[in-house]
Image (cartoon, grey):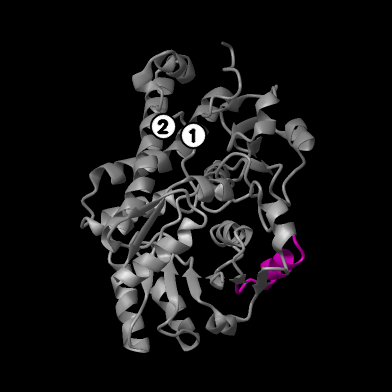
Amino acid sequence: MKKKVCIVGGCGHVGIPLGLAFASRGFPVTLIDCNQAAVEQVSRGCLPFKEEGAEELLHAHINKNLFATTDVSLAAQQDVIVFVTGTPVDEHLNPRVNDVLKVITSYLRFMNKSQLVILRSTIFPGVTQIVDHLLVQALGSSKLAFCPERIVQGKGIEEIFNLPQIVSATSVQAEQEASELFSAIAKKIVPLSTAEAELAKLMTNAWRYLEFAIANQFYMIVEKKGFDFYKIFNAMKDDYPRAKNFASAGLAAGPCLFKDTMQLSAFHSNEFFLGHSAMLVNEGLPNFLVQQLEEKMGNLKGRKIGILGLAFKADNDDTRESLSFKIKKLLELQMAEVLLSDIYVAGTLPLQQFLQEAEGIILGVPHTEYRKLAPTCPYVDCWGVWPRPNS
């Protein structure tokens, strides 16, 4: 008989793909979430956000072996409790470890020592052991695992099924049970200690953040001197294997990469100098793009300047930590009239109205639909999807 699985925070970007993956393998799954609107939406068979392959699975399993609820007491009936609460950073870039502990503490009255408890989202190194101590103190013993999600947002279900799953635990029994559970949905299990797994997740995201910073630094160097970055970029990569993984430039944002780079820095006593440099580069790119538009248009005061694309990545509707909003603030400081448009974000200007009204455009994110556009006003495109003006 399949174990009953509940996911705390189950109607979010981490919980829904995981819940659907387990449900598709026959597990009874309960998605617990404090967001009433999201719970009602999922219960109706509607997704709160874009996720490839999710709609079909949701229609097949919702209210059959997949349920969404705000009733936290249902955690008491489960064999497995998965927490997707991660470790954010505060305004001083310090890890907020207590956020994870508060959520787990609030569920202790519904937990027992026979349940397998899984931490799923990125956490600061050492947090798994802290949670284990918390569970032992409250329950007498624990079965705790840290099994980090490794998915790219928007393609989570596909990647859950096709990527290796790192499994770590604070006991042999917990590791065995977690490995057995994830073997039902992952193609391979990679065992690590809890500290190793915590570091592996942070290092993966920091590595990606550094990759984007390298490309963005090169972009600013080249463009500031008046050269075409993408002409050079494409020549470098053309049939040259050692440059095939060289990332293109673009706004490096979202809820994970910056945060996790700063967590790794905090773990290393704030001596992660590459990480700090990457932050300065990636967070400095919006200002550089505004300066590029100023060079094309002159004073932006009173001009209608459009930001096309507000999501933090292409073909997605998630605007969390998007640097498009930093560009908006910078333009407002220039006293420009800022126009916003994103085909996936409600409440923004329709695309055609945006294109008609904008006197200048900064491409915030290269949604596929935007690639076929040919703006007639001055524009800045750090993604390289539109022809370089006057080239």
Residue beneath disc 1:
250
What residue is rendered at 34% in x and 75% in y?
Answer: 131
Image quarter of the C terminus: top right
Under circle 2, the secondary element is: helix
Residue 210 vertical placement versus 148 (above, below): above
Q: Which mark is residue 216?
A: 2
Horizontally, residue 329 falls left or right of residue 378, namely left
Horizontally, residue 109 falls left or right of residue 341, namely left
Q: Position of residue 31 (x, y in %)?
A: 61, 70
Q: Is residue 165 visible?
A: yes
What residue is rendered at 44% in x and 62% in y?
Answer: 180
Q: Position of residue 247 (x, y in %)?
A: 43, 30
What residue is rendered at 60% in x and 45% in y?
Answer: 311
Image quarter of the N terminus: bottom right
Under circle 1, the secondary element is: loop
Q: Position of residue 315 (x, y in %)?
A: 63, 40
In terms of depth relative to the viewer, which is nearer, 81 or 271? 81
In terms of depth relative to the viewer, which is nearer, 184 or 281? 184
In the rendered structure, are the residues bearing label 1 and label 2 in contact, judged by CB atoms less than 8 Å apart?
yes
